[in-house]
Amino acid sequence: MGWPALFWLAGMLEGEGSFMKPIPSDSRRPLISCRTTDLDVAELVAAAFGTTAQANDKGRHRTEFAALLRGARAVELMTVLRPMMSTRRRAAIDRALFGYAPPRRTLNGVEVEEICRRRAKGHTISSLAWCYRVSRPTIRSVLKGRYRVRGGTPWLPLSGVIRGAIAAGTGLNWKELYWLAGWLEAEGSFCKPPPSSPRQPRIHGGSSDQDVIEEVGRLLRIRPNLEPTRRRNRSPYWRVLLRGRRAILLMQSIRPVMGKRRTDQIDAAISGVNGRMEPVGFEPTSSATNDRCLQV
């Protein structure tokens, strides 16, 4: 995963994620779930979670694939993602974490090495237990080499892979571009130009969360449109539409991190455009981002 997975993951979970409270029989394990019919996308989310994708046979409908993360690592990821999420998702995270009681403290690899070094210098087991806020049997387990160190989470280190770059021609910095790629993977579509405008490929997207669609509109520099009156008891729904040269540039910029279905849509959308531009890459920039939801 040689790209900033954290921000792509935030956009993807904004569209297709769920943040859920633990079930009564397992009160220490809040849950993050992402469900999609695209296996490659589910596997990518699962890789970011450090888990594997699960298949759910839907009978005559397309098979659904799920990436799930539970427990302390789910709590850690929710905490990291919360400032980047919409009002509705933040409320869901707060409900999921309300009353959460963390399990007893665990030691990381650095602490385990420190304990062994300090014990070799003459520190007592009791003093080490008090210093690291664990029990004496835990210290003995460390010294005997039986203690299992929980693996670290990769999200923050991965998020800095291309820090300080923007996608040429799009006007988006690295945080914005990959958040938008994740959101479009979940909620977007890439369409061929209509016969009446053969050089106008289109990017569509929609959401019932006004703050999310306003952020998408800001990134795309367009104004979202409220869908005409929907059926009774339905939430309002906003849509965005980007077309033409800027749509082509954005498609080419995000194509390397999209799933196969979206990649095929992008290729079909821009394949017939005359004078197709070369794929764009990244160029350095020193400008700081002023984005609302991507401050991490």
Image: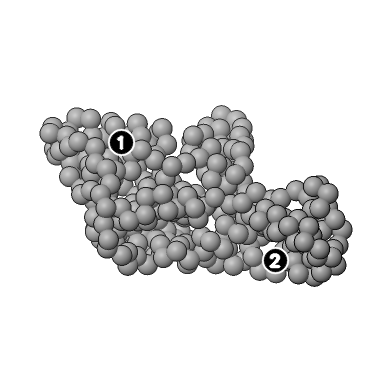
Q: Is residue 73 depicted above or below 265 in this figure?
A: below
Query: Which residue type does callout 1 highlight?
Result: Ile
Q: Position of residue 85 (x, y in %)?
A: 47, 62
Find residue 31 and name its label: none
Residue 211, located in which quarter of the rendered image? bottom left
Q: Which residue: 27% across, 53% down? A: 284
The correct choice, above or below, for 187 with respect to 131 in the image is above
User: Marks 2 and 1, Cα distance to the nearest angstrom?
Assistant: 43 Å
> Does the image show residue 54?
yes
Which of the two labelled residues, at mark 2 and mark 1, occupies the earlier sequence position? 2
- As drawn, is 170 to the left or to the right of 6? left
Image point 33% across, 43% down: which residue? 254
Question: Nearest the camera: 172 or 145?
Answer: 145
Mark 2: few/some/many CA within 10 Å (<14, 14-19, 20+): some
Q: Residue at x 51, y 34 (%)?
A: 39
Q: Secondary structure at mark 2?
A: loop
- Taking the image as shown, residue 81 lies to the left or right of residue 291, namely right
Residue at 24% across / 59% down in the picture?
221
Look at the image and tell me in which quarter the C terminus lies.
Answer: bottom left
Reading the image, the residue beneath label 1 is 266
Q: Residues within 10 Å of mark 1 (few under 14, many from 20)?
A: many
Point out residue 144 in the picture as x, y percentages from the top left corner.
83, 49
Occupied quadrant, residue 73: bottom right
Give residue 100's mark.
Answer: 2
- Mark 2 vs mark 1, foreground winner is 2
